[in-house]
Image (cartoon, helix red, strand yellow):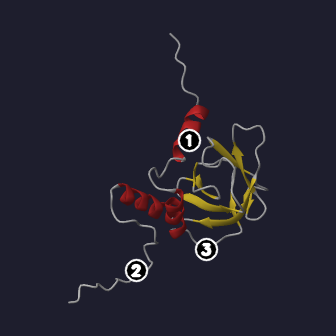
Amino acid sequence: MRRHPVPFAAALVAALTLGACASPGLRDADKYALYDAHAGAPVDHFRYMGQINGWTPLGDSALAVWTRPGEAWLLDLTGPCQDLSYTPAIGLTSTMSRVDARFDKVLVHSRSAISMPCHIRQIRPFDVKAVRAAEKHNREGGPSLDRPSDAPAPAAQPSDSGT
């Protein structure tokens, strides 16, 4: 009896598809706020070796892309990107193993015959561990962690109890 191992490519596609569902239950604006809160300063480019380790849409004009397990980027797009929230796969354009803001594009692989590339407006690295911890905390019902851990806590509001 011959065994047919599951091809690595099929397993990779399944993993990438599941990666798009990283924060179930959060609205797009809330997901974006969580990633934005843990993102660093904008950079001009990042190194890209032609492989995406994971990604998640953050509405129709932003997404998070993992290039390695501990390295990820928040990509803000110039405008709405058709089918970004529903596509099973994406690609990135690059030149000489790097993706440049204001030059490169996100390629959405959709069922429609014509797919428009989505231009990258801004690239920011984000703290993967902090985002994962915030997602876990939010799933467990804790208060929202949509600020960086080093940000000051919001000021307490005075009560009107009259005491």
Q: Left or right of 86: which side holds 113? A: right
- According to the image, label 3 marks what residue? 41
Query: Hey, what amino acid is under mark 2?
Result: Pro
- According to the image, label 1 marks what residue? 17
Taking the spot 46% from the left edge, 72% from the top edge, the residue there is: 148
Give SS at disc 3: loop
Q: Earlier in the sequence, mark 1 or mark 3?
A: 1
Taking the spot 58% from the left edge, 32% from the top edge, the residue there is: 10
Give SS at disc 2: loop
Query: Hey, what amino acid is under mark 3?
Result: Ala
Disc 1 and disc 3: Cα gap in Å? Answer: 28 Å
> Is the C-beta separation of discs 2 and 1 under 8 Å?
no
Q: Which mark is residue 154?
A: 2
Query: Hey, what amino acid is under mark 1?
Result: Thr
Residue found at the far left of this picture: 163
Front residue of 77 and 159: 159
